[in-house]
Image (cartoon, grey):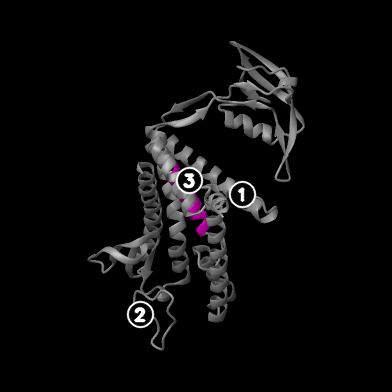
Amino acid sequence: MLDMLRTVLAFIVDIGVLIFVHELGHYLAARSQGVTVETFSIGFGPPLFKRKAKSGTVWQVSAIPLGGYVKMRGWGEERTARGFQPGSFGAAPLASKAAIVAAGPLANLLLAVAFYAGLFMTAGQLITQPVLSQIQPNSPAAQSHLLAGDRVVAIGGAPITNFSDLQQVVLTHPDSVLDFTIDRAGQQLTLPVTVGKATMDGTEIGRLGVIGTNSTLKRLLPGPAIAAALQVTGQQISTWLSGIATLIVHHQGLRNLAGPLGIAQISGQAAALGMVAVINLIAMLSINLGLVNLIPIPILDGGHLLFYAVEFLIRRPVPEQAREAGLRVGVAIILSLVMLVTFNDLTRLGALAWFAHLL
């Protein structure tokens, strides 16, 4: 019972932070462009709590904590004979509309950078040393006479400072010979190492057959912490894009998609591990939320940006019929994804197997 309560609370907190920051991005951008925001809501459905600010915006928390929205004056309304209302979204220039819509996903990406930088300055950044902790039998590393405990100092004269540097060099040099400078029991020597090859998602990559487990936490100063946070965020964005490409081209990874139930389960597990794990999870989810919203599917922020791009090219608003058709397609795609991720979540939780056994 306590585990379930912790999972529910962790899920509400995680989703609440992500949605608040996302909608805050829209809100701040709208205010900066002179657009009046009528409602700022965390959650959908009937409001549980609301308060009207001096700016005229109603801030509220609603009953269903699975989303949120910022309602701007004139959003979705068509121009009347008298034009748009002052301060309405429709009266804003095209560039302002695009900036307002893009600000939500951008806020999520900035949140991830801020959280990672904060972690690196306080708890420290986890750095895996370029030490070969294990050598797999009959691997290219074993055949090249590398030994467990060897520390890789440089490859081809380029310094190696952590295990990720080693991985990057190996992955990008399949079926090749590289000069490894290693530190073995305090003595430096250079060995020619033959990198093997493997295929992953249809792409040929290098393979060495080593495992690195020698990790340390290193606290960073603000400048290096922000730089490291940007690097980690960039790596996660690159990984996400690669995953989407694999999903579209090779139709692989559908079973890995998670929905609210899966996120709730992971949130509970992170909460059990402590605050560092929770902050790491929120940062990762924030990146995913920002990128998902940029997918050019009508109904998402990326879909609106797509319409604005078309409007910019054709020099006139996209016809209302085309917008409505696009929104129908977008809703169908989103509902299909919701059904898919819910099926995945129920499968991972064992609910489908339990129900089949019950039948």
How many residues crowd mark 1 within 10 Å: few (<14), some (14–19), many (20+)?
some
Q: Residue furthest front?
A: 359
Query: Residue at position x 58%, y 32% from top?
Result: 164
Distance, label 1 to label 2, CA atoms, is: 43 Å
Residue type at the position of mark 1? Gly
Q: Secondary structure at mark 2?
A: loop
Is residue 116 visible in the rendered structure shown here? no
Q: Which residues are magenta?
A: 279-293
Name the residue tied to disc 3: 284
Q: Are marks 3 and 2 in contact (CB under 8 Å)?
A: no
Which mark's residue is nearer the viewer, 3 or 2? 3
Query: Residue at position x 45%, y 32% from top?
Result: 125
Q: Earlier in the sequence, mark 3 or mark 2?
A: 2
Q: In the image, residue 283 lies at what x, y percent?
A: 44, 45
Q: Eyeballing the image, is 53 above or below 228?
A: below
Residue type at the position of mark 2? Gln
Name the residue tied to disc 2: 85
Q: Are marks 1 and 2 in contact (CB under 8 Å)?
A: no
Q: Residue furthest bottom?
A: 81
**Drawn side of residue 19 relative to residue 190, left or right:** left
Name the residue tied to disc 1: 243
Q: In the image, residue 99 lies at what x, y percent?
A: 45, 63
**Drawn side of residue 337 relative to residue 145, left or right:** left
Task: Determine if the magenta segment contains residue 165.
Answer: no
Q: Are marks 3 and 1 in contact (CB under 8 Å)?
A: no
Residue type at the position of mark 3? Met
Give the total number of marks visible in the rendering. 3
